[in-house]
Amino acid sequence: MAEGQRVYIICNPNTDIGKSVAYTLLDENYQIILAGPDYSALKALQKQLDQDGFNHVSVALLEPSKEIDWKNLIEILERLDNQLAGIIHVHENESTDPELFEMDYEMFSAKMDAHLWGTYVGAKHIVPLLHTESSGSLLHLVETMKEDDFSMYNAMIKRALDAMLSMMAKELKESNLNIKYIEVDDASLKEVLLLNLDNTANE
C-alpha cells in the first residue's frame, strides 16, 4: 500500500451500500480495510476491486461485538503504518419483521448485540487511535427504511444507534472527531459520504 495515504475501515462492506462506500473511498485515494465476519466474501470483494484497478485494499475478519477481533484489526493497522482517517460502519435493514408482541428474545438480543454492542466496542478501540490525528470520522451509515419496509427491529435498532452516537459525540466534543449517524440510500450516498470524509488532504 502506498505510504502516506490515510486509511478507512469499512465494517460490513459486502452490501450494496458497503461496496459503494469502498469505490468512493478508493476514488478519493484512500486506503481501505474491508472488515466483516465472512472472510471468503471479503476476499472476493478485494479481488473484484483489484480487477477494477484498486489495489490499496486489505481485509480483516471482524465480528463487531467481539473485542478480540478489534484488537486484531488494530494490529493490521499498525502493520500498515499509515494514519487512520476513520471508520465507516454500514448497517443494513433487518429483513425479519415480527408482529409487535411476538419478538423472539434470542433473536432480539443477537441483533442488538451486533448493532449496538458492536458500535460501542468498535468506538472503544478505534476512538483512542483517532484522538492523535488532526481529524477523524466515526460514521454509521444506516440504510433508509421505506415506509412499506417497516420493521420493529429496524425501528428500535436505528433509534438506539442514533441515541448512542449522539451521546458519544457530546462526550467527545473536544476531540475534533466527526461522529454521526446518517441514513442513506443509493441516490444520496456519495454526496453524503464526501461531505463527511476526513478532509486532511489525501493528495
Image (cartoon, rainbow, N blue to C red):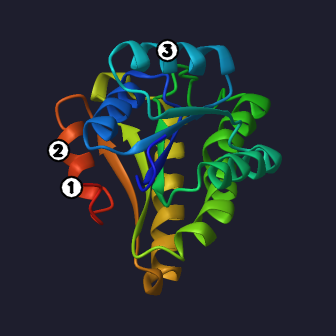
Task: Provide the residue designation for mark 3.
Answer: 47
Query: In what element is the residue under mark 1?
Result: helix
Q: Position of residue 32 (x, y in %)?
A: 47, 40
- Marks counted in the figure total 3
Mark 1–mark 2 distance (CA, rounded to whole Å): 6 Å
Marks 1,2: beta carbons within 8 A:
yes
Q: Position of residue 107 (x, y in %)?
A: 72, 29
Marks 1,3: beta carbons within 8 A:
no
Residue 180 in which image quadrant: bottom left
**Is residue 145 shown left or right of residue 89?**
left
Among the two numbered marks 2 and 3 on one chain, the one whose residue lies closer to the N terminus: 3
Q: Amino acid at mark 1?
A: Leu
The residue that appears at 49% across and 22% down in the rendered structure is 14
Q: Amino acid at mark 2?
A: Glu
The residue that appears at 53% across and 44% down in the rendered structure is 157
Task: Provide the residue designation for mark 2.
Answer: 191
Q: Which is more foreground, mark 1 or mark 3? A: 3
* Crowd around label 1: few <14 · some 14–19 · many ≥20 (10 Å): few
Report whether residue 145 is seen: no
Residue 197 in which image quadrant: bottom left
Q: Nearer the viewer, residue 17 or 24?
A: 24
* Crowd around label 2: few <14 · some 14–19 · many ≥20 (10 Å): few
